Amino acid sequence: MTGLIPFNRRNADLARVGAGLGEFYNMLDDFFSDNGLQSRNLLKDTFKIDIEETDSEYRIEAELPGISKDEIDLAAQDDNLSISVNREEETDKNEKNYIHRERRFTSMSRRVRLANANLNAIKAKLEDGILSITIPKEEKAISSRKIAIE
């Protein structure tokens, strides 16, 4: 029973293990460790968005709790909508002999491609940490068609 979950072989001498098995054992050790994911996790690194498409418009909701509208940059270019958040947070105590002082800078960005979107008529509203964006669709010229041969 004691050998079910091996110790982290990364700390052991991997020279005695075959060339390809070392990475396999490290992957197993990482999977069973209590540290969680060690690599970048996009679910934690950026804000979440929902995109709904109807016949006449796109509706986008972005979760931005604690973010003010001055910290959000909403831009449109070609068929792309870009939502960026830049936040500089500083906790500064005016005491000369402070024990704890923090500074934090957060930058997040999401880009969404929306076909047939009328980017000149975008409406956006930030309420209770939810950025709601409405983008009407527009009819574009047909870019392909079948041509009859005489």
Image (tube, rainbow, N blue to C red):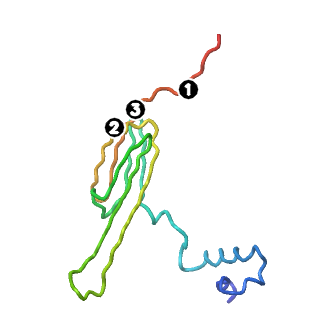
Work out how far the residue at label 2 is from the one at label 3, CA to CA, in angstroms: 10 Å
Q: Are marks 2 and 3 in contact (CB under 8 Å)?
A: no
Answer with mark 1 or mark 2, whichever residue precedes in sequence. Answer: 2
The amino acid sitting under disc 2 is Asn
Answer with mark 3 or mark 1, whichever residue precedes in sequence. Answer: 3
Q: Residue at x 61, y 78 (%)?
A: 32
Badge 3 is on which residue? 138
Measuring from the top left, give residue 45's x and y in whole percent: 45, 65
The amino acid sitting under disc 1 is Ser
Work out how far the residue at label 3 is from the one at label 1, CA to CA, in angstroms: 17 Å
Task: Give the side of residue 31 with respect to residue 78, left or right.
Answer: right
Q: Are marks 1 and 2 in contact (CB under 8 Å)?
A: no
Q: Secondary structure at mark 2?
A: helix
Local crowd at mark 1 within 10 Å, few (<14), some, or many (≥20)?
few
Badge 1 is on which residue? 144
Badge 2 is on which residue? 120
Q: Which mark is residue 85?
A: none
Measuring from the top left, give residue 86's x and y in whole percent: 35, 61
Task: Give the side of residue 65 with respect to residue 38, left or right.
Answer: left
Q: Nearer the viewer, residue 132 or 112?
A: 112
Q: Residue at x 72, y 77 (%)?
A: 22
Residue 145 vertical position relative to residue 25 in the rendered view, above or below:
above
Q: Nearer the viewer, residue 120 or 125?
A: 120
Which quadrant would the C terminus be assigned to in this image?
top right
Answer with mark 2 or mark 3, whichever residue precedes in sequence. Answer: 2
The amino acid sitting under disc 3 is Glu
